[in-house]
Image (cartoon, rainbow, N blue to C red):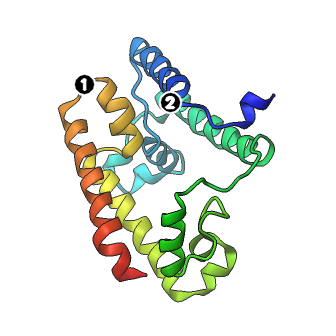
Amino acid sequence: MEIILQTWPWYVSGPLIALIMFLLIFMGKKFGMSSNLRTLCTMCGASKSAGYFSYDWRSQRWNLIVILGAAVGGFIAMNFLSADPAVEINPETVTHLKQLGFESAGAAYLPDELYSINALGNIKSLSLLIIGGFLIGFGTRWAGGCTSGHAISGLSNLQLPSLVAVIGFFIGGLIMVHLLFPLIF
């Protein structure tokens, strides 16, 4: 039981992800979390207002099961299989985050300053969540997929556009952390 309560090392989780990707490629499937949003919108009738949603969503039912499994698995792992739900963060990073106003750094899975119910009453936090959500949605559609679709599935298929997208994700992340994050907070 102790092994399941600990973080799995890369040499266990990495090959398991590779095995899943091999099976999906073998079955002719492309994995991606953001494509489920398209499927859900299509299921709700979005094809009546936009041609982008006009496709046979039933062919993507297997991907909906993947996202359901990820959500249920994440809930079980977080609530029943985690000895300490806080993310291990370098003490220097915790100190730096606390200087920026994140008192929950190192003590919570997500910063309470952004992701708690109380944060929804703060106009700055709410604005950041709305703008961030819009940019992620727009960027995902513009890039033709999200980080999981490009970094896991696209690179597994040796897709050059996915390599370019992943490089862009990392450059954007570095710009955000080192240039924009200190300005915002």
Circle 1 residues within 10 Å: few <14, some 14–19, many ≥20: few
Residue drawn at 47 percent across, 42 percent down: 33
Q: Which mark is residue 131?
A: none
Residue 16: where, in percent of width, then height?
A: 53, 21
Residue 142: where, in percent of width, then height?
A: 26, 53
Residue 128: where, in percent of width, then height?
A: 45, 76
Label 2 SS: helix
Residue drawn at 54 percent across, 27 percent down: 13
Above or below, 105 relative to 174: below
Above or below, 162 relative to 157: below
Disc 2 or disc 1, which is closer to the eye?
Answer: 2
Q: Going by the picture, which residue comes out furthest to the top? A: 26
Residue drawn at 41 percent across, 11 percent down: 26
Q: Residue 28's image quarter?
A: top left
Inspect the image, locate mark 2, and give the three-letter code of the amino acid beneath it.
Trp
* Depth order, front residue of 43/89: 89
Above or below, 76 relative to 122: above
- Residue on which the image places disc 2: 10
Residue drawn at 56 percent across, 31 percent down: 9
* Depth order, front residue of 85/38: 85
* Depth order, front residue of 85/158: 85
* Depth order, front residue of 89/35: 89
